Image (tube, rainbow, N blue to C red):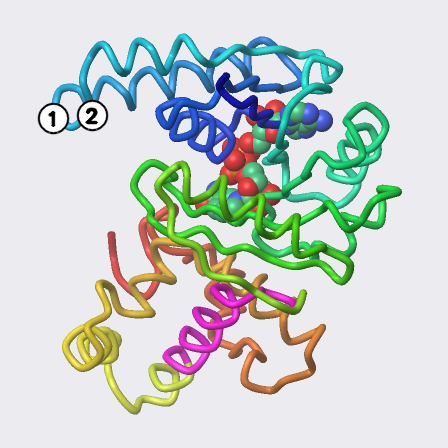
Amino acid sequence: MARKLAVIGAGLMGSGIAQVSAQAGWEVVLRDVTDAALTRGTDTIKASYERFTAKGKLDAADAEAALGRITTTTDLDAVADADLVVEAVFEQLDVKHEIFRALDKITAPETVLASNTSAIPITKIAAATGHPERVVGAHFFSPVPMMQLCELVRGYKTSDETLATVREFAESVGKTCVVVNRDVAGFVTTRLISALVVEAVKLYESGVATAEDIDLACKLGFGHAMGPLATADLTGVDILLHAAGNIYTESQDEKFAPPELMRRMVDAGDIGRKSGQGFYKH
Ligand SMILES: NC(=O)c1ccc[n+]([C@@H]2O[C@H](COP(=O)([O-])OP(=O)(O)OC[C@H]3O[C@@H](n4cnc5c(N)ncnc54)[C@H](O)[C@@H]3O)[C@@H](O)[C@H]2O)c1
């Protein structure tokens, strides 16, 4: 019998996780707080399946079958019998706490509860439950159907069994995992990109090299698909300022201290692609 996955939150990430999981054969129950959010989520999934089908990467019948494996609900109790739960709601600790507190009550004590948080320590999320050993980070990347990586994060009390279960799930939906063994701010991926972006901005701000040359150096010298300043524009200078600032606050490690230029760019509204201007004009 197909295993049942519950996805909490039908936004950008939740709908993507539901999409790849249904395609991989999981029975998926997708939960959000309003019918409108659920409709948006399922419309996104349908449109994505259609694109894959049009490109010949997915059989129309398989897409139909995958859609048939997704049910939607606004009722949290409907996820009580899931084998695994992945939470992908707003990046706010109080909202996540409310969900995990409720999940802790309605699911079996051995059900693994994963969070897709990009930056909140898993240990803090797990603290809302009576079974922190079954709480783990499963950090998927956007767009979920395209991005290969899933960063698994151990909270302070996450058990080996929990980590093994979430790894098996992520691999079953076609992802490759890296494991973060200690619940540090920014995990591995956000720490690496923050350190690189901070140094790139410092080099640019002090006139050592142009933005184009800094990005070219990373692309041609290290084989990066995209340079750090172009990445900052794509992700949002505001988002990276916030991420680096948080890691700096927690770690007190100077290499994450956001350069003044990043702050001024955000003050001025030059946050990258979203605003039309960042390190580059878009
Ligand atoms: N956007 C990204 O690139 C990205 C990448 C990796 C991880 N994340 C993380 O994934 C999580 C979700 O991000 P997103 O970009 O999908 O956000 P989003 O705003 O697109 O979607 C969040 C969804 O959660 C729903 N929601 C809010 N409260 C809820 C509740 N109590 N129960 C059920 N649903 C609820 C909202 O209605 C919304 O549909 C965040 O923790 C974020 O940090 C995001």
Taking depth in this image into account, of 12 and 62 the one nearest to the observer is 62
Instruction: Tell me the quadrant of ligand 1.
Output: top right
What residue sits right under mark 1 in the picture? 55
State the image coordinates of residue 75 (x, y, percent, origin top left): 71, 12
Other-residue count near label 1 (Cα within 10 Å), few / some / many at <14 / 14–19 / ≥20: few
Residue 51 is inside the magenta segment = no
Residue sitting at x 24%, y 69%: 224
Residue range highlighted in magenta: 184-201
Q: Locate residue 87: give its quadrant.
A: top right
Say which residue appears at 58% left-offset and 65% top-offset: 186
Between 88 and 254, the residue placed more toward the observer is 88
User: Where is mark 2, residue-wise?
Assistant: 52
What residue type is disc 1 on?
Answer: Lys
Q: Are marks 2 and 1 in contact (CB under 8 Å)?
A: yes
Image position of 237 (left or right of 116): left
Please tell me whether residue 17 is drawn above or below residue 225 in the rendered image.
above
Which of 121/60 is in front? 60
Q: Which residue is pictured at 46% across the width and 23% down the height?
A: 26
Q: Residue at x 53, y 61 (%)?
A: 267
| Element assignment for label 1 | loop
Question: Percent x, y for residue 192?
Answer: 46, 72
User: Helix or strand or loop: what does disc 2 sit on?
Assistant: helix
Left or right for 255, reference 44: right
Q: Quadrant of residue 61?
A: top left
Q: What amino acid type should be assigned to the residue bearing mark 2? A: Phe
